[in-house]
Image (tube, rainbow, N blue to C red):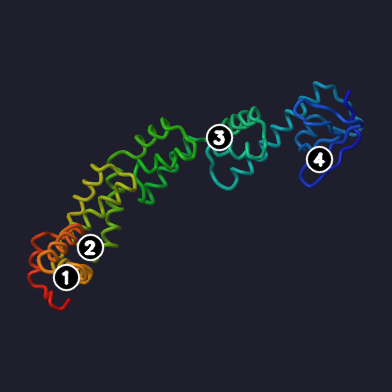
Amino acid sequence: MIKIKEITKLKKLYKVTFTEPLTYKDWDEEQDKIYVCEDTVVKFMLTRDKALTEGEFEQLLSFDHFAQGKALALYFISFKPRTSSEVKKYLFEHHIQSSQIEAIIDYLGKDNLINDRAYIESYIRGKIRAANAGPYQIMQKLRMKGLESQLIEQLLTQVFDEEKQIDVAVKLAEKIVHQKASRLTLQQLKQKVTQTLTTKGFSYNVSAIALETLELEADEENELELLYNELEKTARKYSRRYEGYELKQRITQALARKGFDFGSISSAIREYDFEEE
């Protein structure tokens, strides 16, 4: 029999001291005391001089590991919703036994305190409201949280169908246009919109539809000003190494790479006074 010598209440746990040191299969060495939570004290009605069989003691330890792990998990999820994978990782890092972790996850799942399906739905809807991510980026972010790809794909299909994707892509495209239109030519702006949308996780098809929906038009005055400003900078740069025909070719290629129209480039170069360089 295992006899309790004393029970002392600490800040969060109870220290249970035994009349003699004990050995247990999961311990590295003999111990004459253990620390348990209040749930364990209540469930096993622990008191001074109480005697436990080895079987009862093993049940006590198993229950206490579960109870303390559950308390840790409840603390972890109290700040914000968590995935089952995140809770498992947290418990593992706090040295909760693997068998108990699975039991704790099952317990929390039955009480709907952890719900991966609801977590994914909420995450997707949040991204739709924020209008800042497409389905592929959402998929990647959720996978990083340890969630099942099949469940993510299923809920993306249900919650974020193509019609909603286009709506979100258009909103995001409008933000880009508002921020960049005065600094880019029409061609550059279209490239920027498409590049940003695909980077944010929208398909090329959805990105193209969103771009077409905006019906963007060129501001010729602004485009000419952008072209001449860029021509000025490029000419200063290349005139240090090139001259004549080669200089003009280098400038033409550089401006074309930046999205300017060849016809506009040729016209601007003809009017540009290279003798000032």
Look at the image and tell me in which quarter the C terminus lies: bottom left
Determine which residue is flagged by label 1: 228
Q: Which residue is mark 4?
A: 14
Residues under labels 3 and 1: Cα distance? 63 Å
Q: Amino acid at mark 1?
A: Tyr
Given the image, on which type of amino acid does mark 4 rest? Tyr
> Is label 2 in a helix, a strand or a loop?
loop
Relative to 177, is 73 above or below?
A: above
Instruction: Looking at the image, tell me whether mark 3 or mark 1 is earlier in sequence order.
Output: 3
From the viewer's side, name the closer residue of 254 and 61: 254
Tell us which disc is closer to us: 4 or 2: 2
Residue 73 locus on image (x, y percent): 63, 39
| Secondary structure under the numbered disc 4 in the rendered image | strand
Vertical comparison of 97 with 273: above or below: above
Residues at discs 1 and 2 in contact (Cβ within 8 Å) = no
Q: Which residue is mark 3?
A: 112
Q: Are discs 3 and 1 less than 8 Å apart at CB?
A: no
Q: Secondary structure at mark 1?
A: helix
Task: Say which amino acid is labelled 3.
Answer: Asn
Relative placement, left or right, of 123 versus 252 is right
Dot 1: within a 10 Å radius of its alpha carbon, few (fewer than 14), some, or many (20 or more) residues?
Answer: some
